[in-house]
Image (spheres, rainbow, N blue to C red):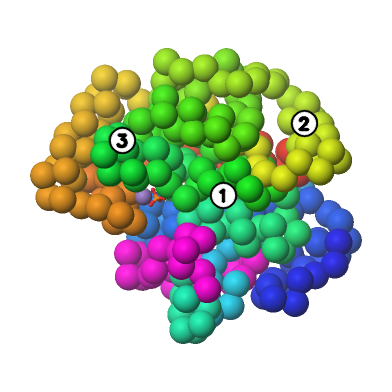
Amino acid sequence: MKLNENIRYSPEVAEAILNDRPVIALESTIISHGMPYPQNVETARRCEETARSFGAVPATCAIIGGRLCAGLTGEQLEHLGRSGLAVTKASRRDMGVIAARGGDGALTVAGTMIAAKLAGIRVFATGGIGGVHRGAAETMDISADLDELGRTSVAVVCAGAKSILDIGLTLEYLETKGVPVIGYGTDEMPAFYTRSSGFGVDYRMDTPEEIARAINEKARLGIEGGTLIVNPVPEKYSMDKDRIDAVIDAAVKKANALGVKGKKITPFLLAEIKDVTGGESLETNIALVLNNVELAAKIACAL
Ligand code: PSU
Ligand code: MN
C-alpha cells in the first residue's frame, strides 16, 4: 500500500503500510475524554504494547497541530492525556475546521475510522462505540459513529455499547445502515461493562480468521462500509448488571435534568459513571480495551 501524503505517519506505521504488514488503528477520544489522567496515557501505551505483542503495529490517530496523524509519539500521547476535556473532541463534522485552525483534536470512533481509511488501515480497536441515545425519538441524538460505520470500510472491534444508549435502537440503526454486527464467541450483543444486553448479534464467529474472511469478501465484492465486531469483556472483569444499570439510569436522569446536549452528553455520562463507580469501572474499561486490541491485532494478521 502507498502512503497518503495528507497523513502524518509515525515511522513505524509508515514502514508497516509500505510493506503491507498488519496495522491497527487506535482512537484518541478514549484517552482525552474517556479515562482520567494518568491511567489514560498508561492505557494508551499498554494498548500499543499489546498490539505489537500480537504482531500488529499500533497507529493511534489524532489531529495534532492541524495535521491528521497515524501513530503518535509518547509526548503527543502525554499531551492528549494531560489535556483531557480541554482537547476538542473531533468527529467527522469537526475535522476540517480543526485542521484549518491548526488545532488539536481527539478523534472519536467516526473520526478514527476516517483517519484509518485515509491512512490505509483496515482494522481499528476501541472500547465502546457511540449509538442511538435513549430518548432519541425526541432529541434525534444519534452518534455520527453509526453513519460512519455505514459508509467507511474499516472493521471496528469494540465491547458493544454502554447502556447509556438505547442498545435496541442502536442495532436497528446499524441494520438500516447495512452494518454487520459480528459477535466474537457470543450470540449476544455485549453492553461494555457486562457480557450480555438481552439483544442478539447478527452473526456469531469464533475465530479471527473467520472474521477476516467476512471482511475480505465484503471488500472483494466492492461493498463500501464498515464491519462491527463485538467482543465481550473478559468474565473476570465484567460488572454486576443491576448495579451498573442503576448507576447509568441515575447519570442519564442527571444529564436530562441539567439539559446536557450534543457532543457533551457522552463525555458527561462517562464521567458520571466513573465518579460513582470509581476504580471498579475503570479497571473493567482498561481490561476490555486491551482485550479488543488483542482481537483486532489477530484479525489484522489474518487479513
Ligand atoms: N462510548 C464509550 N466510551 C467512549 C466513547 C463512547 O463507552 O470513549 C467516545 C468514543 O470516542 C465515541 C464517542 O466515538 O464517545 C461518541 O460520542 P457521541 O456520542 O457524541 O457521538
Ligand atoms: Mn450525539
Q: Distance between the residues labelled 1 and 2?
A: 19 Å
Mark 3 near ligand 2 (CB under 8 Å)? no
Q: Which of the two discs, 3 and 1, sits closer to the camera?
A: 3
Q: How far apart are marks 3 and 1 (CA)?
A: 20 Å
Task: Name the residue that disc number 1 marks.
Answer: 148
Q: Which residue is drawn at 32% across and 21% down?
A: 241
Quadrant of res 57? bottom right
Return the x and y of residue 139 as percentages of the image width and height. 28, 44
Q: Which residue is drawn at 22% across and 45% down?
A: 272
- Hey, what amino acid is under mark 2? Ala
- Hey, what amino acid is under mark 3? Ala
Q: Is mark 1 on a helix, strand or loop?
A: helix
Quadrant where the C terminus sits is: top right
Answer with mark 1 or mark 2, whichever residue precedes in sequence: 1
Answer with mark 2 or mark 3, whichever residue precedes in sequence: 3
Task: Name the residue that disc number 2 marks.
Answer: 214
The residue stretch that appears in magenta = 69-96
